[in-house]
């Protein structure tokens, strides 16, 4: 494997993690990871040396998620939603039992955020990108990223406080 | 001392402040328990988010790793083609900076600069003269998406002098840019080539080239508008803000 391939393999756990913030259901997250890897491989001639592979690949995933999100939303109105409990039980890799109750509450709170705030939270708080890198991935001005992040965090603080999660 | 709002406290927690600013925030937190508590709450969101989404290995990653390992490198031809495309369509490059070149732009058709595309955007002395694009900037909302010629607007905001500015994409001409309201028209601030759209990574409709975003960052005062405010600004005829910041006689 060359450097690009090795880098992509090493990124897989982070890609999966980012996908799970974007897509609450495990099967959807897996689809998103798969599509991202396929598109990253097909587009690798467009990857420039000196670019961060993680930011580049997150950008690929974010674009797929936006496109998919629109059709998923449309389908959601047509197809009856699966029962949430069924999905969780049927989900082999969620490993919920290993997460503390606090972490589960935080996950639900993050999933409940509006898309734009959730994406900012995912890139900065979960993936540890700088504000500048996160803004680039999302294709928004730095100030927009910052205000989304503030709003997302404020509602996380409030939700977790209401649920008595103290961290 | 400036008001310590959540944004500056959040920047402190995330290591996005310079040393001096960070020290000022720390001193304020030492003197004021409410500030210290707010910092602690913001810091907890960071740990909570990280714990909520641990990076874990997954059995399915092995299949993906095999797929990655089996993928072929781009051929030499593709590599050269990519390099040529890069040389002729530098995505990051700004091809027109209004302030720097306004002096000689009178009536310039940009087509030839854009790799022989059929249609360029005419810029006359910095004022936008392309009737179709002017109409789009005047009337179209972000939520309307693209018109028949692939034109759309992205972000709408005010600059430091209260004038309205809007980013736009003109897919047929292969450019994106930023224009701000001046007199009764739109003055071009920056124009940059769109990434080639034939690639596997399609630009999502909301994407703006970095060169344009950099100018947005330098121009914007406050925040970008949401849908309702955008419609209201349009219906108000993009009037310059008269209170406070504008220079009234």
Image (tube, rainbow, N blue to C red):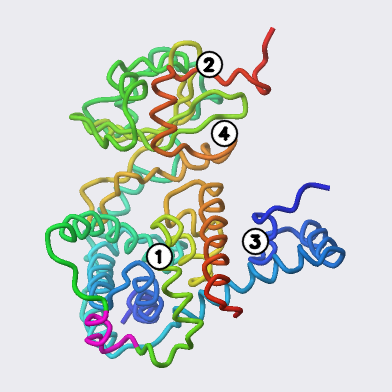
**Is mark 4 in CB contact (under 8 Å) with mark 3?**
no
Task: State the residue in front, A59 or B136.
Answer: B136
Same chain? Circles 2 and 1? no
Which is more foreground, mark 4 or mark 2?
4
Q: Residues within 10 Å of mark 3 (few under 14, many from 20)?
A: many
Q: What's the CA distance linking mark 4 and mark 2?
A: 20 Å
Q: Of label 4 and label 2, which has the lower sequence position? A: 2
Q: What's the CA distance linking mark 4 and mark 1?
A: 33 Å
Which is more foreground, mark 4 or mark 3?
3
Same chain? Circles 4 and 1? no
> Helix, strand or loop at disc 1?
loop
Which is more foreground, mark 3 or mark 1?
1
What residue would you read off at disc 4?
Answer: B219
Q: What's the CA distance linking mark 4 and mark 3?
A: 24 Å
Q: Is residue A88 magenta?
A: yes
Q: Which residues are magenta?
A: A85-94
What residue would you read off at disc 3?
Answer: B10
Task: State the residue in front, B137 or B198.
Answer: B137
What residue would you read off at disc 1?
Answer: A112
Q: Of label 2 and label 3, which has the lower sequence position? A: 3
Left-right relation of B13 to A5:
right
Determine whether B6 is above or below A18 in the image. Answer: above
What residue would you read off at disc 2?
Answer: B103
**Is mark 4 in CB contact (under 8 Å) with mark 1?**
no
Q: Is residue B236 magenta?
A: no
Q: Residues within 10 Å of mark 1 (few under 14, many from 20)?
A: some
Q: Residues within 10 Å of mark 2 (few under 14, many from 20)?
A: few
> Helix, strand or loop at disc 3?
helix
Chain hosting mark 3: B
Q: Residues within 10 Å of mark 4 (few under 14, many from 20)?
A: some
């Amino acid at each position: 494997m060359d450097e690009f391939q090795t880098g992509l393999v090493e990124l897989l756990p982070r890609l999966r993690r980012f996908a799970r913030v974007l897509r609450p259901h495990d099967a959807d997250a897996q689809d998103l990871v798969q599509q991202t890897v396929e598109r990253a491989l097909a587009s690798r001639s467009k990857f420039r040396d000196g670019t961060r592979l993680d930011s580049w690949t997150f950008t690929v995933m974010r674009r797929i998620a936006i496109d998919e999100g629109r059709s998923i939303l449309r389908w959601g109105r047509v197809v009856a939603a699966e029962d949430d409990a069924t999905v969780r039980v049927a989900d082999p890799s969620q490993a919920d039992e290993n997460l503390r109750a606090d972490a589960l509450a935080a996950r639900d709170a993050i999933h409940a955020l509006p898309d734009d705030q959730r994406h900012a939270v995912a890139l900065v708080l979960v993936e540890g990108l700088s504000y500048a890198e996160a803004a680039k991935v999302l294709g928004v001005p730095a100030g927009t990223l910052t205000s989304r992040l503030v709003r997302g965090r404020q509602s996380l603080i409030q939700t977790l406080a209401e649920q008595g999660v103290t961290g | 001392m400036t008001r310590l709002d959540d944004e500056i406290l959040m920047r402190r927690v995330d290591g996005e402040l310079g040393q001096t600013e960070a020290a000022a925030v720390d001193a304020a937190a030492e003197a004021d328990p409410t500030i210290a508590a707010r910092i602690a709450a913001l810091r907890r969101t960071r740990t909570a988010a990280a714990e909520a989404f641990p990076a874990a290995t997954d059995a399915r990653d092995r299949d993906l790793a095999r797929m990655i390992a089996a993928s072929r490198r781009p051929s030499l031809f593709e590599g050269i083609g990519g390099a040529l495309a890069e040389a002729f369509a530098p995505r990051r490059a700004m091809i027109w900076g209004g302030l720097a070149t306004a002096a000689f732009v009178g009536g310039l058709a940009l087509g030839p600069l854009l790799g022989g595309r059929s249609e360029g955007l005419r810029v006359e002395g910095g004022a936008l003269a392309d009737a179709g694009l002017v109409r789009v900037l005047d009337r179209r909302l972000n939520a309307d998406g693209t018109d028949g010629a692939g034109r759309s607007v992205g972000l709408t905001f005010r600059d430091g002098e209260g004038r309205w500015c809007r980013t736009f994409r003109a897919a047929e001409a292969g450019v994106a840019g930023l224009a701000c309201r001046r007199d009764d028209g739109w003055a071009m601030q920056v124009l940059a080539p769109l990434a080639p759209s034939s690639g596997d990574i399609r630009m999502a409709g909301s994407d703006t080239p970095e060169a344009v975003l950099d100018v947005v960052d330098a121009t914007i005062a406050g925040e970008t508008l949401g849908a309702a405010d955008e419609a209201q600004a349009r219906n108000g005829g993009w009037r310059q803000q008269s209170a406070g910041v504008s220079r009234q006689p």
